[in-house]
Image: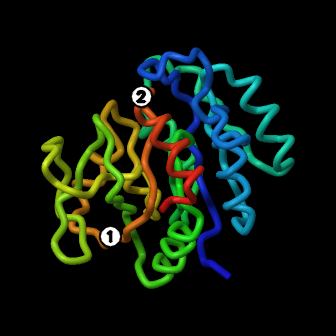
Amino acid sequence: MSSIKHAVISAAGIGSRLGLNRPKCLIDIAGRSLLDYHIERLSWVETVWLVVGFQEEEVMAHALALRNDIIIVRNPEYASTNTLQSIHRVSRHLKERMLVLDADTVIENASFARFVAAAERHESLIGVSSYTTSDGVRTLLDQDAVTGFTREPHHCHEWTGIAVIKPEIITDEPIYVYQALERFLPMPACDVKAFDIDTSADLDMARRVIANNWK
């Protein structure tokens, strides 16, 4: 049994770069939505929080049909705020560390399970991935720790948006989540097969790796 009691899924964004005019968490990947995958893999978590904004009614209905005790948190300012500020709408109510992840992230279940197990050995943990995307934030690594973030594409690991962190790390600021994390580096890292879907190329890769069972 994991000591992590809270998981926060950020699903408020518009996803304008993908251009589907649909919440990315409801995109179909191999016959199921990303939200389906997330809520299923988080079935062991005591409290799952879902932050919604863009087309929130559809996202809420879908989520509650999957798990009726999920806690919905609205971000009506989703068009002018960011993921960090969405997470802050939850973290300000918490005292314990939490698992955070983006709703538009594709994650391989076995490696996610290893990440959760590794979080039992660390107070905080950052998920990094060797699956890289065209616009992803790369991580600087020193052995098993993240020492920085960069946009330089030659680094071979990418920030996944997956982390176990203390709520005080999350602030209500117009900056990226990784920029909030930078103030607390170095932090332990764990490799996860995962990546965000931001573009049509990312979506194609997601469908390909899932069809091939991440081989």
Marks 2 and 1, how far apart in space?
Answer: 26 Å
Query: Going 57% across and 59% down the picture, which residue do you hit?
Result: 213
Q: Position of residue 14 (x, y in %)?
A: 52, 21
Instruction: Check the image and report above or below for 113 versus 84.
Output: below
Q: Disc 2 or 1, which lies upstream in sequence?
A: 1
Residue appearing at x 76%, y 32% in the figure: 60
Task: From the top left corner, tell me how far across and down residue 144 is, in percent.
Answer: 26, 76
Q: Circles 2 and 1: CB distance less than 8 Å? A: no
Name the quadrant of the N terminus: bottom right
Callout 2: 10 Å neighbours few (<14), some, many (20+)? some
Q: Is residue 43 left or right of residue 117?
A: right
Residue 4, position in %: x, y? 59, 71
Q: Is residue 113 above or below residue 180?
A: below
Circle 2 SS class: loop
According to the picture, the residue beneath numbered tag 2 turns out to be: 199
Q: Which mark is residue 48?
A: none
Residue under pointer 1:
189
In the rendered image, which quarter is residue 53 located in? top right
Q: Nearer the viewer, residue 100 or 91?
A: 100
Side (left or right) of 136 relative to 38: left
Q: How is the image coloured?
A: rainbow
Image position of 22 (left or right of 112):
right
Amino acid beneath label 2: Thr
Identity of the residue drawn at 46% across and 79% down = 118
* Residue at 62%, 61% in the rendered image: 6
Query: Which picture quadrant has residue 47?
Result: bottom right
For the residue pair 41 and 32, the one nearer the viewer reads as: 32
Q: What's under tag 1, amino acid-wise?
A: Ala
Dot 1 falls on a residue whose secondary structure is strand
